[in-house]
Amino acid sequence: MMDFMNQRKISRHREGGLDDLRTACAAGYLGFREFLLAAARHYLANDKPWRAKAMLTALMAGTNSSRNLETSGLLQQAHREIAQIERPTCSLNMIVKNESHNIDAALGCVDECVDEIVIGDTGSQDDTAARARMYGATVVPITWQNDFAHARNLVIDASACNWILWMDADDRLSADSARKIRQAWMLLPPSVVAFRIVNEACAGFGSAFMQYRLVARREDVRFERPIHEHIAPSAHRAGLPARQHADISIVHTGYRNLDEHMRKARRNLPIIRKAVVSHSDDWSLKLSLGECYTILGRNEEALGEFTQIADNREVWNSYRDTYLQAHYYAGLLCKESGKKKQAIAYLTRCCSLAKSRCDASYLLGKLYYDGGDEHKAFNAFLAAASTPQQCLHIAAVDGKRIQAESLYHLGRILIEWEKWNEAHELLTRAIAAYPDVVEFYAQMGKVCFCGGRFVDALEYYRTSRKLSPRHNPEAYANIARIQLVQGNLADAIETLVEALEHESAAPDIYMLLGDITFAQRRPHLALASFEKALGSGPVDKTHAPQLWKAISSALDAQEPQSARRFLQKILQVEPQNADAQEVSRKLEIEAMAA
């Protein structure tokens, strides 16, 4: 009975596509060799003879003579079809080591896209190679020599198609991008083509940059540099035109794990340092060295590399993107080390040479704002927010995050200037572009509240609370304030209690609870709330009304020690306050009498 059920499952999988066959093989319903034969037939039927050839070649290495005749016939068919292909073809190239957790997703997203897959394995100890062969990959063992370009070039040498698309195991393609890449090599003349690379991150929208990933295969076009290898220079020398397709994205998932990012930096550091010595005229390598130092927290060494590049005007003539990026990094590290003037100088030069460097404009805005120059800050944030998103460089920039944060700071400054109409207009655009950013709703709520539009303000604050119900005290506090203005005391209390339930117990929440319970003549609750709001943190003159309420609540609750603590706080901010001094004397007299 069990054999019969298994046969039915195998039959169903065979009727499906390759994913079903792989599932059957992984579940043990289909043997590996039987899977290879079935998958090879599939690839032959779908005009991918190189993929079928790889699988059939692996089968021929076996000893099952009953299968060899059929396998041999299919292999001959694959060779005939390869010889007859006249259309452009593409090989996917990859170098891997112990990528069992990644390889299925990487190859699965290009399964229907490329004609050939050639994998350079630099010494995997897991089942990476076996998994790759399930996608019709040719796996080439490579002895690792601390040279990424050397490894990638060996994979090119083992490839046979007209075009080379290179990826890493932690890269992913959407179905739309895979379709567009296929159109690119099918329709373009021989060239080298850059795509938009998106680094997924733990926070933010993910940074993006342009990188050459597709190139027409020629004997004189090879990767260069042992690390952070690139193929564009040799393609340029070979006369291949360069093209950019920002509408095609490859998503890089390797930066999701910060520990893995650090591990790679530690691995790369000795390779980069050695490469810098042997390629002393390659300024982009020195930039890579500075980046590696930065990741590892060695900021002084990093700053030394960046300033060496940024202070050499000759670099601008041949390494423009490198020159600009060095300015940005130098500005960033100078800012972090408190060297404000140097930071502004580097960032200003970067912005003047490239108006599209939104990251430099944003950082410049932060420096000006922190220094109290709101007008210069406003102009810098405006430049950052206005940079078109399609402006990409060799450096990875989280353009959406920068634009969103720049819009936030612009709104903040307009609110401080009390330019309500301009703030409303800007925030309307910001919410339309970034409907999930909580801070924009809070800002719009404040704009509406200050304009007397309480119903609109309440709606924006409620949207903020809905998007972020936990740890959002500002939304809860302002909802409660509006409810108090509208005379809805019970609703305000309910809102504040809800805030405490959602761990939004900020001083503002307790302050409002204190005000409400004080007005209700509930001294014990009022005192407890004011203790939470004012008991441990610093105070200033703006807190005087609540401090007096706290003192009054403490006296009504017959808590003289609490009253004394709040009196001390009053006297800290108003040492000559006669009323506080008088109450303090009375408390001392009562204490002595007791």
Image (cartoon, helix red, strand yellow):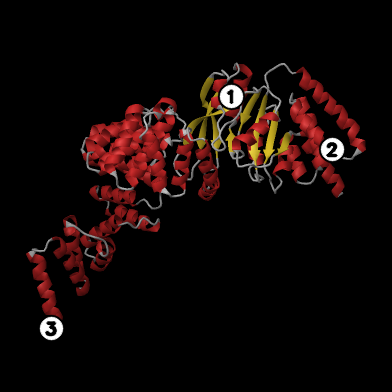
Choose between 151 and 17: the one closer to the eye: 151
Residue at 51% in and 43% down: 273
User: Residue 173 falls in which quadrant of the image?
Assistant: top right
Q: Residues within 10 Å of mark 1 (few under 14, many from 20)?
A: some
Choose between 288 and 171: the one closer to the eye: 288
**CB atoms of marks 3 and 2 within 8 Å:** no
Q: Along the polypeptide, which appears first: circle 2 or circle 1?
A: 2
Secondary structure state at the residue bearing disc 2: loop
Residue that badge 1 annotates? 180
Instruction: Confirm whether residue 452 shows in the render.
Output: no
Cα separation, mark 1 vs mark 3, equals 89 Å
Residue that badge 2 annotates? 61
Question: Residue 446 location in percent, x, y?
Answer: 27, 42
Say which of marks 2 and 1 sits in front.
Answer: 2
Instruction: Confirm whether residue 430 shows in the render.
Output: yes
Residue at 86% in and 32% down: 71
Secondary structure state at the residue bearing disc 3: helix
Residue at 87% in and 27% down: 73
Q: Amino acid at mark 1?
A: Lys
Secondary structure state at the residue bearing disc 1: helix
On the rendered image, what quadrant is the C terminus found in? bottom left
Q: Amino acid at mark 3?
A: Ala
Residue at 74% in and 23% down: 47
Residue that badge 3 annotates? 593
Say which of marks 3 and 2 sits in front.
Answer: 2
Q: Residues within 10 Å of mark 3 (few under 14, many from 20)?
A: few
